[in-house]
Image (cartoon, helix red, strand yellow):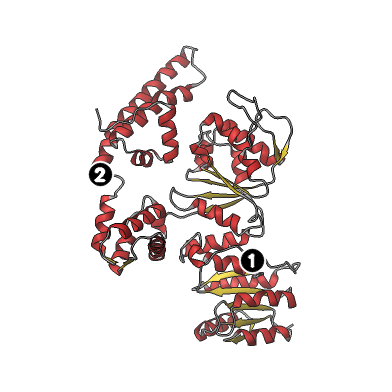
Amino acid sequence: MNPPTILIADDDRSIRTVLTQALGRSGYQVRTTSNAATLWRWVEEGEGDLVITDVVMPDENGLDLIPRIKRLRPDLRVVVMSAQSTLMTAVKATQRGAFEYLPKPFDLKELLAVVARALAAPAAEPAAPSEPRVNGENNLPLIGRGTAMQEIYRTIARLTTADLTVMISGESGTGKELVAHALHDYGRRRGGPFVAINMAAIPRELIESELFGHERGAFTGATNRNQGRFEQANGGTLFLDEIGDMPPEAQTRLLRVLQDGEFTTVGGRQPIRANVRIIAATHRDLRAAIRQGQFREDLFYRLNVVPIRLPPLRERTEDLADLARHFLERAREDGLPAKSLDQGAVETLRRHRWPGNVRELENLMRRLAALCPDEVIGAATVRTELAEAEPMETGDAALADAAIEPLGRAVERHIRGFLAAHRDGIAPSDIYDRVLAEVERPLIQLTLAATRGNQIKAAAMLGLNRNTLRKKIRDLEIPVVRGIA
């Protein structure tokens, strides 16, 4: 039996040589060409068991060739390679019928594994290619050519043909809502609505009404029937942002909807079918929240069908130059002066820790575009702006530690009292709630005092979303202070 034949089309001779040697050592027969016309002639003649093609070739775009190959020979797998390693490339390759997309430079071991999988894959039913909606490469929602972002692009591309529930995790400012929009805009439901709701920004008592709607007279003030976000998102996508801040009673009801596929409005009796795709996002460690009894484990597994982790910007510094250029260009389109960064400025960006992630970088670029008089921005200017925007000075952090230290002694005192009560047979059954109620208000007060009333700094220190902190300040009626008394 003859070994499988791999057809390779790439206008880069060094790529053809490397692939020929690697695939030949693995026992495959290889035929290579530098153009799409020769590749298409081989396909028409029935040659080859697998195609590996570049995107940019002198006579035709490799992506445009894929639908023709799939119509003529549906079982012939196509693997796409490209140095144009953007989200759009990955999505187009997948939606036009490619078996896999590999950004250049690629790992040879990974390519050989993809080849083996493609040759072993069972025959698939031919699918009609679909085109994602996009308004030019400059409007792509996600920017980055590093390894971490490439894997995210590939995951998004694979999900464009499925309605699976997705859980996006990552620190604040990493772009979780951008990923949710991409999953919707390039997916099956792109013709339907995209509805977002932030769990941390809605008062606890209104979350169920916001999600599921309510009937007239369901509660005081409900003078009309109100559609909830599930109804508004019918036929489209519902994005549940900061799902880790959802209160327990709402978690229970959401789980029931995910299990049964239908819901009722608050005060209603008629079940409504939930025809939505759920995408959830959180900056919290939900597994830790499960251990602490703050998040339902069964709901977590319902939502975490496909996990996507967005890396913090400090883990993808290879993308900083592309991101900075993108944000400077966006600033120019918004009417700010055209600016660029010199190499020293880029290196300065790479050394920064980026606690605010991509959002912090975008704000910095807009600030530089507006305020810097130089057309080419240098390292000294970037260093000055980063120092002035530093979210937490060493002195502030030490001051905050000193202010919060007494809380630990207060908690210890309460627990010792509860243990003594237990020995006397009169222990309360709500120790957790009573300790939390006792320390939460002073904890937030002291942290705000230590940060001189700066809620962004306080939220970062407490590990809370800024919206969650604002809500707690409001609910606990905490006055915003300046300085420590």
Q: Mark 1 or 2 closer to N-term? A: 1
Where is residue 19 shown, x and y percent of the image?
56, 81
User: Tag 2: Cα neighbours inside 10 Å, few (<14), some, or many (≥20)?
Assistant: few
Q: Position of residue 35 (x, y in %)?
A: 59, 86
Residue 405 placement: quadrant: top left
Q: Secondary structure at mark 2?
A: helix
Residue 414 vs 88, above or below: the answer is above
The residue located at (38%, 38%) in the rendering is: 462
Label 1 secondary element:
loop
Instruction: Report which quarter residue 353 is drawn in.
Output: bottom left
Q: For mark 2, what is the residue?
A: 394
Horizontal placement of 485 versus 459: left or right? left
Cα distance, mark 1 to mark 2? 51 Å
User: Which mark is on residue 131?
Assistant: 1
Quarter of the C terminus within the rendering? top left
Left or right: 185 in relation to 371? right
Amino acid found under the numbered disc labelled 1: Glu
Q: Is residue 460 visible?
A: yes
Position above or below: 445 against 147: above
Pick the front one: 66 or 297: 66
The image position of residue 119, as x and y in percent, is 68, 73
As drawn, the label of residue 467 is: none
Three-letter code, disc 2: Thr
In percent of width and height, residue 94 lies at: 63, 67
Residue 313 figure quarter: bottom left
